[in-house]
Amino acid sequence: MGYADILLSPATIWYAPVGEALPDETTIAYGEAWGGNWDQFALTKTPVTLNRDVSTFDVFVEQTTVPLRRAITEEKMTIETQLAEFMGDALALVMGGTNTATAAGAGQVAYEKVVAGGEWTLPERAWGIEGKYIDADGDQFPVRLFLYRATVKLGGELSFQKGDYVGIPVQIEALGDTSKAIGAQLIEIHRVTAAATS
């Protein structure tokens, strides 16, 4: 235990198709592109937060006032933040729509057109967060959190105002991956703590 285990880090959000290989903890250093089909989401205006919401059922018997057993009946994981970049691709992603970019030309301005609405299925993707761990020697390593399957949606209101810039509120909600063992179906976390020895 030591002060190096106190994590003080910004976070970057990544997404990929469901089933995409996770970035290798040995060959992909902190801050490097994750490779494969992983794309970086956008810059964030607010901290990236993870919430685990668990509902339980308590077993009581007549002979005591305290619960004797407890079981999980529901488990949810949600990543939330606000995106700092107001751009078509990010808006299309969180609204379940599409973005079409038109280049500038003679008599034509460059613009992005986002359309959404009417679709009843939410696209599923793999999602990841990367932060930075710095050891006692000052060496930096990645801390990565992965949701194997999740959906994304607009997580609140878009607020246009003169005293602040527009942030896009985002909620990334995990789904279970039942191809994995019980106890490992929602999330995976990697914390690299030292370099390879050779």
Image (cartoon, rainbow, N blue to C red):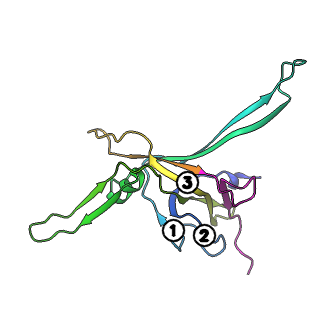
Chief SS of the magenta region: loop
* Crowd rating for badge 2 (residues with CA inside 10 Å; few <14, some 14–19, many 20+): some
Q: Residue drawn at (36%, 48%), measured in percent from left and top? A: 118
At label 2, the amino acid type is Pro
Of pointers 1 and 3, the one earlier in the residue sequence: 1
Of pointers 2 and 3, the one earlier in the residue sequence: 2
Which residue position holds label 3? 150
Q: Residue drawn at (26%, 58%), measured in percent from left and top? A: 113
Q: Nearer the viewer, residue 147 or 137?
A: 147
Q: Quadrant of the C terminus?
A: bottom right
- Residue 7 x %, y %: 63, 52
Which residue position holds label 1? 38
Give me the C-alpha separation between circle 2 and circle 1: 9 Å
Which structural element holds mark 2? loop
Look at the image and give the residue range highlighted in magenta.
175-198
Q: Residue drawn at (64%, 72%), measured in percent from left and top? A: 24
- Residue 156 x %, y %: 42, 39
Residue 185 part of the magenta segment: yes
The dot on residue 23 is: 2
For discs 2 and 3, the disc positioned in front in the rendered view = 3
- Classify 8 as above or below 139: above
- Classify 103 as above or below 126: below
Which structural element holds mark 3? strand
Q: Is residue 56 left or right of residue 30?
A: right
At label 3, the amino acid type is Ala
Residue 7 part of the magenta segment: no
